[in-house]
């Protein structure tokens, strides 16, 4: 009994609220620090690409943004499903907090892709499998947000959103494998588990550093939004009222 | 070192518009999203403050 209680400790909104509050400054700090190192390696250490010149340097944000857009969708669908299946309020709140950040990373992946496509392919956009499936991801995020915002009953909105998020999750493997399944203009995977990376290792390091920075940033901002959602939903809970009194006492 | 001068750095071998357009929007998005999340948290806090 006690061990299962401990396991679910951070599933309780007040515990999560306090823990996230402590972690947010560290996550922002980590994102800033690793991001600066990544930019330094990306612009000053990594060599110029033999075929693409300097335009290739967009890769250091394009690939991490695209990875985050897919990862955050799966995490969002996962928490939405947990919130639905186990009636876990906090899981549903985290799912909702993830959606805007995932949307923005999708926009960034598409935007940086367009700005990279123009000088290298000669087109801002092509209706190719990789680009189209990433655009569908953007519509799935927007659809999820529109759906949950349009239903007044909070929990019903959470459940409806979970269903949409889960059905839409099939799109993520489609994006990932699109470059292998279809003949596309987009280049293949930059990193593969089974083969040696095809790029210089300083380029790879810059890309991985930027991925860590994006990841830390995403956690920080999602935690911040989750804290806001917790307060909005648990306005009448005793612990929130106690928090308000404490803040009033501290003169904030 | 890839660049001989700042001018060369900003020019990005002629791809400056594309490279800085990409990095620029990223920076703008991260700043605005952080501020908006912070504002939402502050608003939620001030509302319980009023109620409590």
Image (cartoon, rainbow, N blue to C red):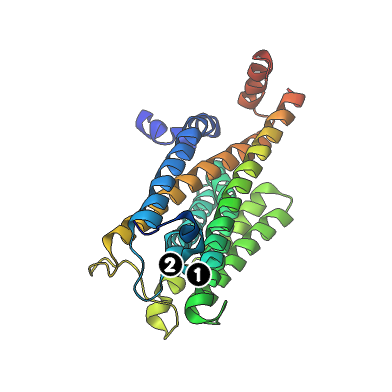
Q: Mark 1 points at which residue?
A: B14
Q: Judge by depth and name the residue closer to the eye, A56 or B12.
A: B12
C-alpha span from label 2 to label 1:
8 Å
Viewer-nearest of discs 2 and 1:
1
Across and down, in percent, residue A31 comes to 45, 43
Q: Judge by depth and name the residue closer to the eye, A32 or A248.
A: A32
* Mark number displayed over residue A54: 2
Chain of the residue that carries numbered disc 2 in the rendered image: A
* Mark number displayed over residue A204: none
Residue at image point 23% right, 69% down: A194
Across and down, in percent, residue A232 comes to 68, 37
Chain of the residue that carries numbered disc 1 in the rendered image: B
Q: Is residue A88 visible?
A: no
Q: What element carries label 1?
A: helix
Q: Residues within 10 Å of mark 1 (few under 14, many from 20)?
A: some
Q: Can residue A190 be seen in this view?
A: yes
Across and down, in percent, residue A216 comes to 45, 45
* Residue contact at pointers 2 and 1, CB within 8 angstroms: yes
């Amino acid at each position: 009994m006690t061990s299962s209680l401990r396991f679910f400790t951070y599933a309780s909104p007040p515990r999560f609220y306090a823990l996230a509050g402590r972690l947010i400054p560290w996550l922002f700090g980590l994102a800033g620090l690793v991001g600066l190192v990544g930019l330094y390696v990306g612009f000053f250490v990594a060599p110029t690409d033999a075929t693409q010149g300097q335009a290739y340097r967009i890769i250091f944000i394009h690939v991490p943004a695209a990875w985050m857009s897919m990862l955050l969708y799966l995490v969002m669908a996962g928490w939405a499903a947990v919130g639905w299946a186990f009636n876990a309020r906090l899981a549903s709140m985290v799912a909702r907090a993830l959606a805007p950040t995932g949307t923005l990373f999708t926009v960034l992946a598409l935007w940086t892709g367009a700005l990279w496509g123009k000088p290298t392919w000669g087109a801002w956009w092509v209706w190719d499998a990789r680009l189209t499936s990433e655009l569908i991801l953007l519509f799935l995020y927007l659809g999820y947000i529109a759906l949950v915002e349009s239903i007044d009953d909070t929990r019903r909105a959470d459940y409806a959103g979970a269903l949409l998020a889960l059905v839409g999750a099939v799109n993520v493997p489609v994006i990932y494998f699109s470059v292998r399944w279809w003949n596309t203009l987009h280049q293949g995977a930059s990193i593969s588990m089974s083969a040696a990376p095809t790029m210089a290792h300083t380029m790879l390091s810059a890309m991985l550093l930027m991925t860590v920075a994006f990841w830390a940033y995403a956690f920080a901002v999602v935690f911040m939004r989750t804290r806001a959602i917790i307060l909005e939903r648990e306005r009448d809970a005793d612990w929130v009222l106690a928090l308000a009194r404490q803040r009033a006492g501290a003169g904030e | 070192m890839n660049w001989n001068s700042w001018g060369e750095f900003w020019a990005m071998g002629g791809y400056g518009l594309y490279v800085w357009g990409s990095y620029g929007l990223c920076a703008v998005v991260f700043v605005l999203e952080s501020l908006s999340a912070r504002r939402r948290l502050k608003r939620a806090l001030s509302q319980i403050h009023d109620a409590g």
